[in-house]
Image: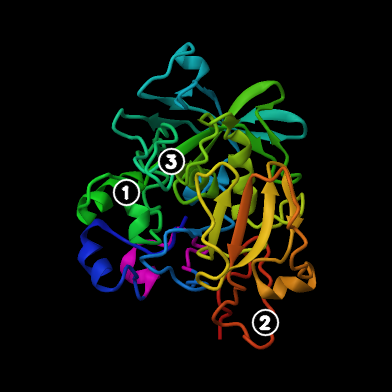
Amino acid sequence: MNLAFYQKPFLLTALLAAGGRCVDPCPECKPCPDANPSGECPAAIGPRSDPNDPDRHSQGPSLKGGRLERYDVFLGHLDPGGVIVTDESNGESRPRYQLMPARYQDGELIREPDEFIVEFKRADVDPCTRDQLGTSIGTLPLYTVTNRLGSNLCGDQALEITSLEEIARCDSSKDPQVQLDAFNRVQGLAVAVEGRWDPESWRYDTTVDGTRVLSLACITGVLAKCTHWGYIPWATRGTSNLSEHHRACVRAARAQYKDERRTFTCGRTVADFFDDVGIQNPRGSSSGGEMFEFYWGADGPPCIERPRYRACEIEFPPRPGSCASTTGWKIGIASTPNIPPWDNPNNPRLCPEEGLDCTPPIP
């Protein structure tokens, strides 16, 4: 499934006229969702999506997105429908309550001094969590997260569109404007998933020091993107619980080739995601020039044939065909051999790590 150009509600006419693309995605179309710490917008990387090509995602190294990137965990858990429950709510989900952030340090869970207002309205659910046949996968609640000053921590975060097919998942109407309006209901909002991803070991745990915790992510962080793409941790697909698919998707989207915090991709790199339960189906290597990358499990890549960026082949030499007999995988990815536009196409040198090298050098 395909996810990577840029939009605003009033840009539908321009999107259709331009074949679904924004010529200059940073300044004209929207705030940059994967901005580096200085606030500068990275240049678009890799080929942009064809509007008739439904099978690629715009991934990136950002785990939580926006200002939520700086917070470790929040105290609370989810009910069976994915709605936040806190100790203060006496075990019941509420439309509006305070949520306390915390951090894990020196073997201890420490409460942060901040408190956030988390608001959930019944209308705030992701309308796009369907498979490619339009079948609903599950309900994904969306939240507005504000600080004490009333500032929305995800207010400037806008999810990228990759194709007209992508917005078609969000509404059964044949009207592209209605479909785009439905898609835009996710903008500026956050998703909650249970557990914590340790920033050092990258180990995932549902509890920290015996306490149930939540991770909040703006819609631009891969924790949220993977739920939006259909891998809802509390949902099921046939006999498969999708929690492992979500964890595999998070690692795959960040190109986390090793069991540590290093990532080997840039924001806005386009890749073709598919899975073993038919939520997203592969397009085939002949379409769009993609070549198979790897199969991914919940706790790491069981098999890698080649990295997402050509310059990373020094550390991860290509092994074509080596994954043909792999079993037990959850997520597969194919992509073009990406080269940033400022790198040398004949001798690429940029192997992204942690997103630090994803912006063009200053002349």
Q: Give the residues drawn in magenta, as a range.
A: 24-41
Provide the residue designation for mark 1.
Answer: 183
Residue at the spot x=48%, y=68% of the render?
40
Q: Position of residue 17 (x, y in %)?
A: 24, 72
Q: Which mark is residue 348?
A: 2
Residue 299 horizontal side relative to residue 173, left or right:
right
Q: Position of residue 296 (x, y in %)?
A: 68, 50
SS for dot 1: helix
Residue 95 horizontal side relative to residue 323, left or right:
left
Check if residue 162 falls in the magenta segment. no
SS for dot 2: loop
Q: Nearer the viewer, residue 243 or 332?
A: 332
Q: CA distance from mark 2 to mark 1?
A: 36 Å
Q: CA distance from mark 2 to mark 3?
A: 36 Å
**Badge 2 density bin: few <14, some 14–19, many ≥20, Cα 10 Å:** some
Q: Nearer the viewer, residue 180 or 24?
A: 180
Q: Which mark is residue 190?
A: 3
Q: Main secondary structure of the magenta part?
A: loop
Which of pointers 2 and 3 indicates the residue nearer the eye? 2
Q: Amino acid at mark 2?
A: Pro
Q: Position of residue 259 (x, y in %)?
A: 77, 49
